[in-house]
Image: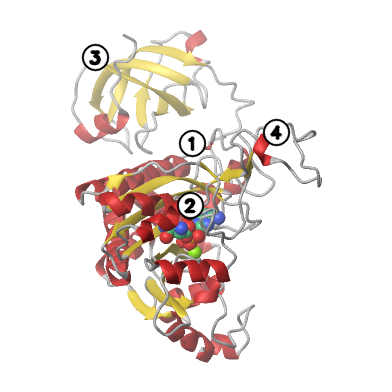
Amino acid sequence: MFNKRTRIKDLLANESLSSGVIVMGWVRTFRNNQFIALNDGSTNNNLQVVAELGKFKESILKRITTGAALKVSGEMISSLGKGQKIELKANSIEILGDSDAEKYPLQPKKHSLEFLREIAHLRFRTNTFASVFRVRHTLAFAVHKFFNDKGFVYLHTPIITASDAEGAGEMFHVTNFDLTHPAKNEDGSINYKEDFFGKATNLTVSGQLEGELAAMALADVYTFGPTFRAENSNTARHLAEFWMIEPEMAFYDLEDNANLAEEFIKYIISYALENNKEDLEFLSQRLAEEEKQKPQQERSEMGLIEKLEFVINNNFERLTYTEAVQILKESNHNKKKKFQYLIEEWGVDLQSEHERYLVEKHFKKPVILIDYPKQIKAFYMRQNDDGKTVAAMDILAPGIGEIVGGSQREERLDKLTERMNEMHVSTEELDWYLDTRRFGSVPHAGFGLGFERVVQFVTGMTNIRDVIPFPRTPKSAEF
Ligand code: 4AD
Ligand code: MG
């Protein structure tokens, strides 16, 4: 057996002085032909490995370069040097993988996030990205733990589907046609009957509709999977491939839904604070340094950890779309025409500048907006008695804007089909969905949390491309 290594994180945490220790990792720096800073990805704290002068052959020493992979065995001793309590006195050093220091793209200096995005295959080896992806892991784990502890069933909804759950037409087609010669109908249109699935298919934009089917039997379910949107939004908050968590609950109304969403968001943030304190402290410092580059009025009032603790310890503000529009309309920002899109009338969709004004300037905390105008929301949302609004809910977070979108679902068959017809959503194609309303329909609700947006919020990373290992965005699908 090759792998008998101890993780550096555990060595540093235990501070035990023992012999026969084996570590493996990558060289960050090598000073004075003697001191190796070794990192194995378990923590940003490097282990100092000491290669005593004269003990190792020159042929080995010259291969200890930045990026090289080593196996070291030796003895943990108290460190004489500053900066670390303990260090590993090497008895043997084996080079597992050489790294040509001249060509290695990651030099021991600060690189810009933009540059690191171009070498995303290597950016895991930086402290920033190692922290981000450890936190991302913890958040993903916390998602499953939260729902499992509550008795929800984790449902795997399909990636390939024939329906547009959001009715927004932002789908990627899935086909195995030879695109230079697809089968055609007499009128020249594509004949999907001849395609792999015998009909037009696409990558899913949401697992919600299938989630609703399962909720009508299992009661409490959730999905957590990749979703795909061909929206041409080149922003710091949009990806063409992103992960979404979508719980769907029978016997829930909008208020139950909002309560669950708030509890859920607070839970996963607390879980990360408890289990990734060191990484969050690192990211907090990183953010503080980044903020120093910004003009005073754009800097955030709170540090990262302070902000996360604030979110956990305070209730989210809840208000209706109508109240929000009133606030925005009367804001100085609107009066002084500081919004790119001015708020003039009820019914307009809120832009991210409006959402951010509400959370960052007005309420200074996360906000749950409910009861949106029906014309700007999807067909499946439950119609309110006023005839104008639906039981929708969006959660807005400081620095991000919309982080959750959800609603109580229209459980009344007649109201649902009426709305589908108005919105030109085919009742024929979604006949299976309508069956849930025909047989034992119940009030139910659910929401979708954009996983990368929550990772952005927790890690303080400004660009969504920096919280997913290999971002897919317009004109970019590297690695
Ligand atoms: O608001 P959306 O479109 O809602 C739905 O898809 C519903 N079917 C969810 C449900 O009720 N089950 O998307 C939900 C969330 C957004 O609030 C946002 O956080 C995230 O998904 N999201 C994106 N994240 C990254 N890149 C994109 N292009 C995103 N589009 C939506
Ligand atoms: Mg939305």
How much space separates mark 4 and mark 3, taking CA atoms?
A: 59 Å
The kind of residue on which mark 4 rests is Phe
Q: Nearer the viewer, mark 2 or mark 4?
A: 4
For marks 1 and 3 on the same chain, the one whose residue lies earlier in the sequence: 3
The residue labelled by disc 3 is 20
Discs 2, 4 touching: Cβ within 8 Å: no
For this view, does 116 lie left or right of residue 430?
Answer: right
User: Residue 85 at what x, y percent from top left?
Assistant: 26, 35
Q: Earlier in the sequence, mark 2 or mark 4?
A: 4
Q: Residue 116: give x, y in percent of width and height.
A: 58, 42
Q: Position of residue 197 (x, y in %)?
A: 58, 36
Element at badge 3?
loop
Q: Nearer the viewer, residue 25 or 51?
A: 25
Dot 1 alpha-carbon crowd within 10 angstroms: few under 14, some 14 to 19, many 20 or more: some
- Choose the circle earlier in sequence order: 2 or 3: 3
Q: Amino acid at mark 1?
A: Phe
Residue 206 — which label?
2
Read off the residue under disc 4: 177
Give how far apart the Cα atoms at labels 2 and 3 are.
Answer: 52 Å
Tell me whether the residue at label 1 lies in contact with that at label 2, contact meaning CB atoms closer than 8 angstroms.
no
Residue drawn at (42%, 49%) of the image: 210
- Sequence-wise, the earlier of marks 4 and 1 is 1
